[in-house]
């Protein structure tokens, strides 16, 4: 019998969405190529991070959002080190060491360390009751706080902040969203759609301080936060403060390993680090052609290409991703993609139906759809998104485009609407 070729060793740092997705893709195409070891700082198997918001809102349980149970790793011969953060990688010896001393050597290394929440460095940011929103521990801390405390402030009116605010509100807290921008979700919505969103959220009980700058988190005298002070002098009572003011690629380890980083580990089109071809990076910790993504769709695309390269197939290039936006607040439908604000040289087709609370804005450059912003009816969001990605002329459809993929039934359902070219 021919002796079996020894397997190569793959070590994955980060047991989150990108790392494990890459492993899944690799197992599909080269199940026997590697002995795989996964290190995860969190004491959990891989779970669907984006579903933390439904967990916070009481719509799902933590158990329901687990993507790969511990048994899955065992079934695939993967050594899983849960709750073990890697603190050191010796690139010359190709050796990984975790905080507790656990070691693993590698032939190829995959970095998938995700992001760190950005904590505003204001006075009081380290008080008890001031947290960020990234993982199961944060979600549990918020749920616990809702059982003991009454007032919450969420700093940041982006997707994450609004989902946090909604969850806390649903669980009975009085919540104020403090947002530096002039309108909510200014990176995802135009002012008009954002106003509709704000009205709906306000009807549900959320309060807002827009265009507001946080000055400090104030101490209750016993080390817990009691209020958020704004630069305009206002004080908003808060016994829980959730900072949702952005994320930063987690490159602490990569930097210590002397990998070239600039807002993420710099990678090429096969997701190999520019510094060391044995080392790959995927997900939010990677910077590809100047972009570090903060959403899951790009990392799924990266995972396919990276797995392909790890499998020694060598084909497949990652060329970047187009992203679209949704908010996971039950009963609120919004969608945007592309150049939804409408840069110079673009036209807009706008449909407003105040009765149904529907707003649709399509942005075209010539006859090519380049952006969409939808509120209240997102039925055609993915269709518009496909058109944006295809970047082809929509010429013949232009007149009915705003009514969606099935304009007859859509138009029939919106008798009061008139599209207006703007
Ligand atoms: C509440 C919430 C809601 C979201 N909703 C959406 C959404 O609706 N749509 C969307 O597209 N995206 C959403 N996102 C973003 C999405 O979750 C991320 O884009 C995705 O999880 C990134 O995957 P990743 O593997 O790069 O990072 P992560 O999933 O964060 O995984 C990284 C893992 O690496 C671990 N790690 C870091 N350093 C080390 C180390 N040294 N050693 C060992 N382990 C380490 C971390 O603990 C973490 O478990 C949401 C995020 C949050 C927090």
Image (spheres, rainbow, N blue to C red):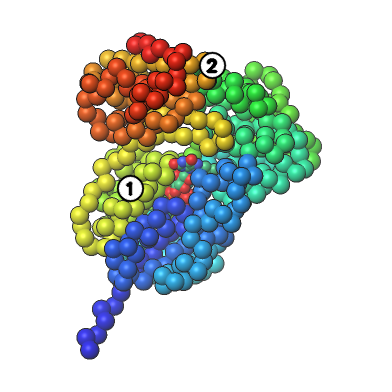
Q: Is residue 172 visible?
A: yes
With 237 as the anchor, is 301 left or right in this view? left
Q: Is residue 214 visible?
A: no
The secondary element bearing badge 1 is classed as: helix
With 188 as the anchor, is 27 left or right in this view? left
Name the foreground residue: 169 vs 80: 169
Residue 124 in the image: x percent, y percent? 67, 36
The secondary element bearing badge 2 is classed as: loop
* Residue name at image x 60 percent, y 37 percent: 164
Q: Which mark is residue 355?
A: 2
* Residue name at image x 30 percent, y 58 percent: 307
Crowd rating for badge 1 (residues with CA inside 10 Å; few <14, some 14–19, many 20+): many
With 173 as the anchor, is 324 left or right in this view? left
- Seen in the picture, residue 188 relative to 297 is either above or below; the reply is above
* Residue name at image x 60 percent, y 31 percent: 155
Name the foreground residue: 163 vs 243: 163
Crowd rating for badge 2 (residues with CA inside 10 Å; few <14, some 14–19, many 20+): few
Q: Quadrant of the N terminus?
A: bottom left
Residue on which the image places disc 1: 301
Q: Quadrant of the C terminus?
A: top left
- Seen in the picture, residue 326 relative to 413 is either above or below; the reply is below
Residue 6 in the image: x percent, y percent? 29, 78
């Amino acid at each position: 019998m021919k002796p079996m070729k020894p397997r190569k060793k793959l070590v994955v740092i980060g047991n989150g969405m990108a790392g494990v997705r890459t492993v899944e893709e690799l197992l599909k195409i080269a199940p026997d190529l590697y002995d795989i070891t996964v290190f995860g700082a969190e004491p959990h198997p891989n779970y669907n991070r984006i579903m933390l918001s439904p967990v916070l809102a009481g719509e799902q349980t933590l158990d329901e959002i687990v993507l790969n149970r511990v048994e899955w790793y065992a079934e695939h011969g993967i050594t899983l080190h849960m709750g073990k953060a890697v603190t050191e990688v010796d690139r010359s010896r190709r050796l990984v060491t975790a905080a507790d001393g656990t070691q693993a050597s590698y032939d190829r290394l995959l970095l998938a360390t995700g992001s760190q929440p950005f904590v505003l460095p204001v006075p009081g940011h380290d008080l008890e009751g001031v947290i960020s929103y990234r993982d199961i521990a944060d979600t549990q801390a918020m749920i616990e706080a809702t059982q003991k405390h009454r007032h919450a402030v969420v700093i940041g009116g982006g997707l994450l902040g609004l989902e946090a605010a909604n969850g806390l509100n649903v669980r009975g807290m009085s919540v104020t969203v403090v947002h530096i921008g002039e309108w909510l979700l200014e990176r995802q919505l135009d002012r008009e759609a954002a106003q509709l969103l704000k009205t709906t959220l306000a009807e549900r009980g959320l309060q807002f301080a827009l265009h507001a700058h946080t000055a400090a988190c104030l101490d209750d005298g016993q080390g817990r936060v009691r209020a958020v002070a704004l630069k305009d002098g206002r004080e908003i009572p808060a016994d829980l403060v959730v900072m949702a003011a952005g994320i930063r690629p987690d490159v602490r380890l990569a930097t210590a390993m002397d990998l070239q980083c600039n807002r993420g580990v710099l990678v090429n089109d096969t997701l190999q680090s520019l510094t060391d071809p044995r080392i790959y990076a995927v997900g939010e910790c990677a910077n590809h052609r100047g972009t570090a993504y903060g959403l899951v769709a790009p990392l799924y695309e990266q995972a396919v290409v990276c797995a392909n390269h790890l499998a020694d197939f060598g084909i497949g290039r990652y060329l970047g991703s187009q992203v679209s936006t949704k908010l996971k607040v039950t009963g609120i439908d919004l969608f945007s993609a592309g150049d939804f604000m409408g840069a110079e040289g673009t036209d807009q087709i706008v449909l407003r139906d105040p009765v149904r609370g529907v707003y649709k804005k399509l942005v075209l450059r010539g006859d090519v759809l380049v952006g969409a912003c939808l509120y209240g009816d997102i039925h055609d969001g993915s269709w518009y998104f496909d058109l944006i990605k295809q970047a082809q002329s929509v010429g013949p459809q232009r007149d009915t485009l705003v009514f969606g993929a099935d304009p007859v039934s859509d138009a029939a359902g919106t008798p009061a609407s008139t599209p207006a070219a703007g």
